[in-house]
Amino acid sequence: MDYSKKKVIFITGSLCDGGAEKVMSILASGCAEQGANTTLVVLREKKMVYSLSPHVNLVQIKVGKSKFKLIRRIIKLHKVLKYSEADVVIPFLPIISLYTLIANRGVRKRIIMSERGDPNVKYFNNKLSVKDRVGSFLMRDCGLFGKSYKMVFQTEDAKNFYSKSIQDKSTIIPNPLDISNLPEMFYGERKKKIVAVGRLSNEKNFSLLIKTFNEFHKKFPDYILYIYGEGKQREYLEQYINNLSLTDFVRMPGFISNVQSKIVDASMYISTSNHEGISNSLLEALGMGVPTIATDCPVGGSRMFVKTNETGILIPTNNSERLLEAMEKIVENKNYADQISKGALKIRNELSANEICRKWLDLV
């Protein structure tokens, strides 16, 4: 299909870390590569880690050290929208959607909004920042999601959280998998390395992974656990590792932009999240054929792609016993591990960036 007449603006807070930000970079690049006139607006002056296609029109808003940063950002975003020929604007995350709605006053672009996580947590979790809670409250309880032209959800469970009026104008589009930068499946003797990837935060439940690895280590002492990512729980997790005398066997290298190359030859990938939209690192692990274990957490993203005995092993949330069983099964049964590895590779076609970007452009 010819997408050369499509004109779209994507809006994100940053391109430095975070799953939604990574997806935004893939979508903007993919839409531009397919011929659409694509602009990406980055609202904050943070260093950009995720790469973009040279065909993307990048606008990074800079406001300096003004006391009125937020107001100046919205004013500058308003000018971008006002003078753009694009008909459709796509922001991610509630607070960015809120800024976009304000900036769109008097401009009247069509806004496609998107829920990227578990809405139950966003609206009922007191541990969220005040900014995020206010943004979530306004978007749902004050009806601002109703101002959208269309809504996009990652899973049916997330969609079903909202009112019928929202559901009637919504569609399901999962995260894209950028296979252009994804290593092929590793063949050969896998390293005795267990990997996890994600922000070091409470919802990822890395403490459960470390606790279970402690039991696994007693039977399989040659394995090393690597947890890639950065976050507020680093100090807590490091102390927990030290208390279990695992400092030589559990490593946390921090955030690594090319983490795929670090995990492609691992014995297994594990996601222990208590809640999640669709984990990008989980999709990448499946796409590389790394034997995968994931918790069946809300809002059903893992369940969509991890099928026990076919593409990986799906286990209940916060269940150390079932996690340990799954880890031992992968290590002790090489044929089984190879079976689920090869089964997972179909995701490379199912979620290719080209395919997912086409769905977005068709919606536009």
Image (spheres, helix red, strand yellow):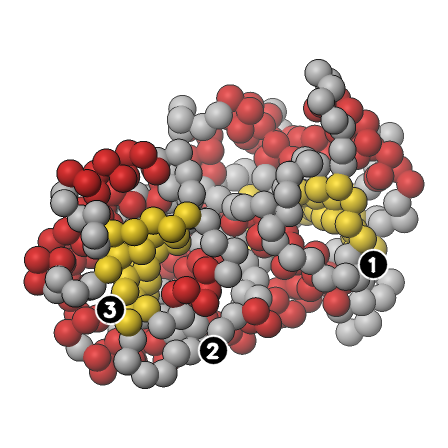
Choose between 172 and 312: the one closer to the eye: 312
Q: Is residue 149 visible?
A: no
Which residue is label 3 attached to? 192
Q: Which mark is residue 284?
A: none
Which one is closest to the eye, mark 2 or mark 1?
2
Mark 3 or mark 1, which is nearer the start of the sequence?
1
Determine which residue is flagged by label 2.
Answer: 184
Q: Residues within 10 Å of mark 1 (few under 14, many from 20)?
A: many
Residue 324 versus residue 291 in the image, above or below: above
Name which residue lies at 23% across and 36% down: 239
Query: Type of residue at label 3?
Result: Lys
Mark 1 and mark 3: span between their CA atoms?
Answer: 46 Å
Circle 1: residue type = Asn
Query: Considering the numbered disc 1 on the image, is that residue within a helix, a strand or a loop?
Result: strand
- The vertical placement of 346 against 224, above or below, is below
In front of the other: 170 or 235: 235
In terms of depth relative to the viewer, which is nearer, 175 or 169?
175
Answer with left or right where residue 187 lies relative to residue 256. left
Picture coordinates of residue 261, whole percent (x, y) = 45, 67
Residue 153, horizontal then vertical, whole percent: 55, 50
- Residue 188 visible in the picture: yes
Crowding at label 3, few (<14), some or many (≥20) Cα neighbours within 10 Å?
Answer: some
Label 3 secondary element: strand
